[in-house]
Every structure is written in C-alpha cells, then in structure tokens.
Amino acid sequence: MLKVDSRDIVLVVDDSPDTLRMLTDAIEEAGKTVLVARGGAQALAMIERIKPDVILLDAVMPGLDGFDTCRRLKQIKELAHVPIIFMTGLSETGDIIKGLEAGGVDYVTKPLVPEELLARIHVHLANARKTHGAQAALDVFGRFLMAADAGGHVLWCTPQTVKLLHAALKDFSTDHYVLPPKVRDWLRECLAQGPAATIPPIPLSDVGATTKTAMSYIGAIGADEFLLRLAEGGADNDAELLKSAFGLTQRETEVLLWLARGKANRDIAEILDLSPRTVNKHLEQIFAKLGVENRASAAGLAVRTLVGR
C-alpha cells in the first residue's frame, strides 16, 4: 500500500453524491487529502493501492453494506489500527452496537455536522497513532509480548510473538485464540496474587508446545487486559542469560531477575528469603557490574537484554 501524501488521508465511503460533496469540501478545507469510494467493493479495491489514515463509512449502501465492508477491512493486517467511523441515518441502539462490533470506533448519525465530524477524526487519529506507535516500538525492540483478558482470550500479540506461538503451538491462530486450559489456570493464579505475583513462568511444553518456550506474567495494563511475555529457551533461560551477560553470581542473578519483573526490594527479600539489607548489598554489586547507578537503570538494562535475545 502506498502513502500518497504527507497529509492525513481520509477515505470516504458513501453512495450519496450530496454527502460526498459536502464531506470532500469540509475535509479538504481542514488540510487533509480525501479519497472517495461510492461503495464497499470500490473501497476494498482502492485500499489495495493506497492506505488511508481514517475511514468514514456509510452503514447502509446497496450491494456490500458498511458493516460487511468494515469486517473485511479489519481483516487486512495493514489496516488493523486504522479508525473506521460509521455514518448513517440509523440511530437504534442495535445498529450502533452492530457497527462497533464490526470494528468501528465511532458512530455518527446523519445529517452530519462537519465540525463535529472533523473533531472526531482528530481524536481517533491521535488515539490510533498512540496505540500503533506503542506496539510498533515494542516490535522494534523485539519484544515477545502479548496481552490476554482474565478468561485467557488473546487480545493482541507483537509479530515476533505470533511467529513464536505458531512455531510452538500447532493450534495457535491470531483469530479469537484462547489460551490452553492449563495456561488459563496459571493465569488465574497470577491474577489472584495481584501485583505482587511470584508464580514462576509456565513452560509451554506443558501444553504440547513443540519448542522450548515459557510464558511469564508481567502485570495488568487495563481493566481486563494483562501483559504476558514469551521467552525462547524455557523458564530457566532468563537467569542464565543475565548471569552470562553481566558476570553475576547466582544470587545476584536472582535479585536482578526479580527486579526486572518489577518487584520492590521488600518483595525480592521475601521471595528469596533474604533480609532487605542483603538485597541492598546485592544490588550495589549488580549496579557496579552493569555500570548503572540505580535500580531503574538496572531493571531497564536487564529487560532490554532479555527481550532483545
């Protein structure tokens, strides 16, 4: 797909000439590039060549309606983060829900108010870029991260995680995948312990993985969204990697590993059955060996080492 302009590209999909004319004028006056499609099929053909930044989509059109068009657009990987705003005269709650379930981020009713629509475009573009930028940054650093809800439904994965899961689990699919029962039980244990969870990573070999891979619980990042990390080489590989990378003793390695997992000194002391004073002494040695001055820098360096393997 090509990006034809440095300006934002808005694709307007509507079969009404009056609506297209009004929106084209308003959007161009706002300094954006406008593309026009008279129906769902034409829109799908158009995005094979050009990638829009936001899509305005009429819900009711002859032939392929807006709801089916939206579902097909959302199946295209490159458009997954592109916000789709429905425009329609339908205002029943069921129609609004149908649009959101199809993948729309917003729903505006006709007659349209250009100023309001432009404001919504601005907000959804900003939100989409924040989300897409954050996940893209994770991918650049090679992080094997994913998120799941409390029921074990996978919400999103970085591309590296998808590749790793495809290699490890024969039944893995990016479409509505649910973690295996044993992994869901492990996740429930992690959630029950809360932020101070000390449950070790679960080897995916326990659920039939064909590669040596382990899953770690990182923490909550939303109301029902929990961050998980995968590691090639199994659950013990994290410690071995840190130990060899920085020339640490076994105990220093254990302290740094829990520090990288976000644990406070008091929690690390309890987990490793040490006194807080001993943990502090180990941290002093760790800081010296890593060439850093504080725990935040040490944790950051450890995480970058683990995720960049």
Image: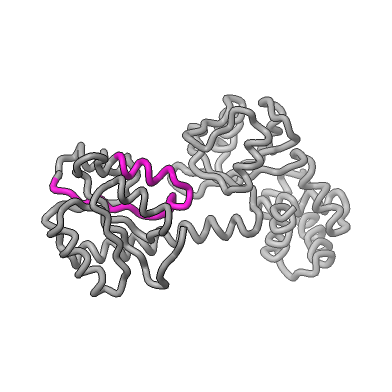
Q: Name the residue rendered at 52%, 31% in the picture.
A: 178
Left/right of residue 20 with respect to residue 287 in the rendered view: left
Is residue 75 found inside the magenta-colored segment of the image? yes
Q: Image quadrant of residue 90?
A: top left
Q: Compared with residue 162, is residue 307 higher up or lower down, i.e. above or below?
A: below
Q: What colour scheme governs how the chains and residues are painted in the rendered image of this protein?
A: one colour
Q: Compared with residue 251, is residue 3 higher up or lower down, i.e. above or below?
A: below
Foreground pick, 19 / 252: 19
Q: Name the residue rendered at 22%, 66% in the picture.
A: 24
Left/right of residue 158 with respect to residue 168 in the rendered view: left
Left/right of residue 284 with respect to residue 57 in the rendered view: right
Foreground pick, 53 / 267: 53
Q: Compared with residue 169, is residue 28 higher up or lower down, i.e. above or below?
A: below
Q: Residue 271 location, x and y as percent? A: 72, 43
Do we see residue 118 in this rendering?
yes
Q: Image quadrant of residue 207?
A: top right
Left/right of residue 232 with respect to residue 176 in the rendered view: right
Q: Residue 286 location, x and y as percent? A: 81, 61
Q: Name the residue rendered at 47%, 34% in the picture.
A: 176
Do we see residue 150 in this rendering?
no
Q: Residue 55 location, x and y as percent? A: 32, 56
Q: Residue 66 location, x and y as percent? A: 26, 44
**Which span of residues is magenta-colored?**
68-89
Q: Image quadrant of residue 121?
A: bottom left
Is residue 33 found inside the magenta-colored segment of the image? no
Total numbered badges shown on the rendered structure = 0
Q: Name the residue rendered at 25%, 65% in the picture.
A: 118
